[in-house]
Amino acid sequence: MARGTRVANMARGTRVANMARGTRVANMARGTRAAKQARRGQAANRTRRGKPTTFARAVTSATPANPGGQAARLAGALQALAKGLPNPWDESTDYFHGFAAALPAGARLDAAAFRQALGVGARYQLALSPADDVLAGLGDAADDWGEDIAGGFRQLASVMRATLSDRSIVHARGKGVIRVRVWLCGRTEDGAVVGLRSISTET
């Protein structure tokens, strides 16, 4: 019986030892998984910190070809105000899209400066004219558009008058060109050209 007891005790000791080793192995495995997860999280954080968002790049990467964040935000705001407003120069679905282009503050806004700022090709003839009368006419056209649309144009005109100088309407015409690009725009304090672009069908 004594020998049987010793054998039983040894067997129990072996099982306990095996269980302890199993526990250590499991703990090590869990620790390894946790470490891998932690490393992946740290790598993801470094990636997020190292790669700025598109909006951040737009704000911080102003260059001669890029007017920077303030002009881009104003262009986006004008596009939001123009959402749902019909194109007064075309019956298609070519509505308004915001744009911004760099131009030195001291430069005069004429056809040559506009062509360079927007990269308009030499085959197109640019025609600039004051936009205030155009904007006023759109805001007064409740009989044609309805009061809601006319009110939208009045709101757009108010914001453009408050934020932009040299308000202009620009057409890019060319031989045989029916779908004529048109820009409704002005200048910000730092000289950038900001506004809305669309299409005018001319036959």
Image (cartoon, grey):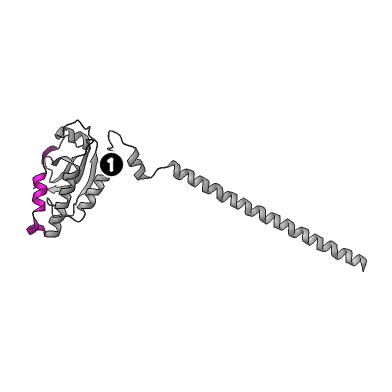
Is 45 on the left or on the right of 24, as rendered?
A: left
Residue at horizontal 71 percent and vertical 58 percent from the top: 22
In percent of width and height, residue 125 lies at 12, 37
Give the residue at the far right of this rendering. 2
In percent of width and height, residue 176 lies at 11, 42
Q: What residue type is labelled 1?
A: Gln
In percent of width and height, residue 33 lies at 60, 52
Residue at horizontal 9 percent and vertical 47 percent from the top: 134
* In this view, 15 is above or below 88: below
In percent of width and height, residue 166 lies at 15, 38
**Magenta segment, which residues?**
119-146
Q: Identify which residue, 42 or 95, lies in the foreground.
A: 42
Give the residue at the far bottom of this rendering. 1
Label 1: which residue?
Answer: 70
Crowd band around label 1 with a 10 angstrom C-alpha radius: few (<14), some (14–19), many (20+):
some
Q: In which quarter of the image is residue 74?
A: top left
Residue at horizontal 64 percent and vertical 53 percent from the top: 29
Secondary element under disc 1, as helix, strand or loop, is: helix
Number of marks in the rendered image? 1
Query: Where's the N terminus, which quadrant?
Result: bottom right
* In this view, 117 is above or below 184: above
Is 2 on the left or on the right of 25, as rendered?
A: right
Give the residue at the far front of this rendering. 162
The stretch drawn in magenta includes residue 87: no
Residue at horizontal 46 percent and vertical 44 percent from the top: 47
Q: In which quarter of the image is residue 130?
A: top left
Give the residue at the far left of this rendering. 143
The stretch drawn in magenta includes residue 144: yes
Q: In which quarter of the image is residue 54?
A: top left
Is 26 on the left or on the right of 201, as rendered?
A: right
